[in-house]
Image (spheres, helix red, strand yellow):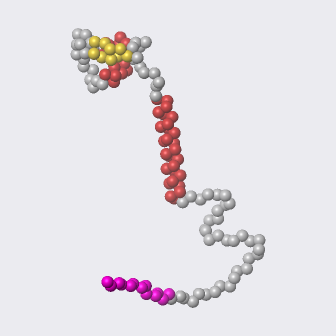
Amino acid sequence: MSAIAITPQPRTIQTRPTQVRPAQVRPPHAQPTRPSARPVARGQVRLTRRGRLVVFVGSLLLILGLAFGFGARSAATDEPEQTRVITVGDGDTLWQIAGDIAPAGEVRDMVAHIQQLNGMDTGGLQAGQKLVVPVAG
């Protein structure tokens, strides 16, 4: 069997001579100076561009979550709508049927509601067809 041994080669590090600066004398009560261009007041928070983006996206998600949470709760009804089944007669139209059930002036809305309850794309009816309609009242 043969074995290969790999050893790292030593690196030589070249250093430059550094200049030694004389120590700056500060009074003992002086605050250390900051290298930033703008001084920051104590207790103030500075956000980077990424930090502002994170705060914005987090706020947006919180608002959307609250809107969906409260919106879903207010739209739901606990009581199912009472309906009955009628049979379409000769010459009956959806408008006439909706007019018999709907309160005054809301026939158009009742037609759309009956179409939704029965999964109808159009208002065409056939004699003998069964329709689910809301109970009048």
Tell me if 113 is positioned left or right of 69 in this view.
left
Is 38 in the magenta?
Answer: no
Quick one: 77 or 42, which is closer to the camera? 77
Q: Is residue 108 visible?
A: no
Residue 84 quadrant: top left
Q: Position of residue 30 (x, y in %)?
A: 74, 71
- The answer to if 6 sits in the magenta stretch is yes
Q: Which residues are magenta?
A: 1-13
For image coordinates 36% across by 21% down, the residue present is: 113
Number of marks in picture: 0
Q: Quadrant of the N terminus?
A: bottom left
| In the rendered image, the vertical position of residue 19 relative to residue 39, given as above or below | below
Could you say which quadrant of the image residue 128 lies in?
top left
Residue 132 coordinates in the image, percent (x, y): 33, 17
- Where residue 88 appears, as percent x and y from the top left, is 27, 12
Picture residue at 27% right of the left edge, 25% below the top:
121
